[in-house]
């Protein structure tokens, strides 16, 4: 598992290799504003512990291209530091 670092909140962000089904389910939970279900999925499938899953889910973009922390909405890469607020975003399509 790769780890990224977020300057903004000073946390190490895990970067799990999810299988495609789990990844889709996870994104669906995040986009439905159900972060607790997203965290539970990561823990139940043994990708990571609950603390790491919370950090991870927090950094996922709820809307593709939009920063989870501020109103910047021009993110173009999967893992990108927001140029406006310096938060790391996991910007999955
Ligand atoms: Zn952060
Ligand atoms: Zn931002």
Image (cartoon, helix red, strand yellow):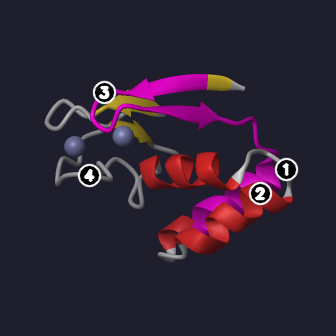
From the image, tell me which residue sits under label 1.
46
58 up-or-down from 10: above or below: below
Frontmost of labels 1 and 4 is 1
Ligand 2's quadrant is top left
Q: Does 27 lie within the magenta span?
A: yes
Tag 4–tag 3 contact (CB < 8 Å):
no
Label 2: how many Cα within 10 Å (few below 14, some 14–19, many 20+): some
Tag 1–tag 4 contact (CB < 8 Å):
no
The response on whether ligand 2 sits within 8 Å of label 4 is yes
From the image, tell me which residue sits under label 2.
43
State the residue at coordinates (55%, 47%). 56
What are the residue bounds of the magenta stretch?
3-29
Q: Does 22 lie within the magenta span?
A: yes
Frontmost of labels 4 and 2 is 2
Q: Classify residue 58 by image quadrant.
A: bottom left
Label 1: how many Cα within 10 Å (few below 14, some 14–19, many 20+): few
Is residue 77 visible in the rendered structure shown here? no
From the image, tell me which residue sits under label 4.
69
State the residue at coordinates (17%, 38%). 85
Is residue 78 visible in the rendered structure shown here? yes
Instruction: Compute the Cα span from label 1 to label 4.
Output: 27 Å
The response on whether ligand 1 sits within 8 Å of label 1 is no
Question: Of 88 and 74, which appears nearest the observer?
Answer: 88
Q: Classify residue 77 by image quadrant.
A: top left
């Amino acid at each position: 598992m790769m780890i990224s670092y977020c300057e903004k909140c000073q946390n190490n962000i895990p970067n799990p290799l999810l299988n495609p089904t789990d990844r889709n389910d996870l994104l669906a939970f995040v986009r439905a504003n159900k972060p607790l279900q997203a965290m539970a999925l990561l823990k139940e499938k043994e990708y990571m512990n609950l603390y790491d899953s919370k950090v991870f889910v927090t950094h996922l973009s709820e809307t593709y291209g939009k920063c989870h922390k501020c109103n910047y909405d021009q993110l173009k890469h999967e893992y990108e530091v927001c140029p406006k607020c310096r938060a790391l975003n996991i910007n999955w399509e």
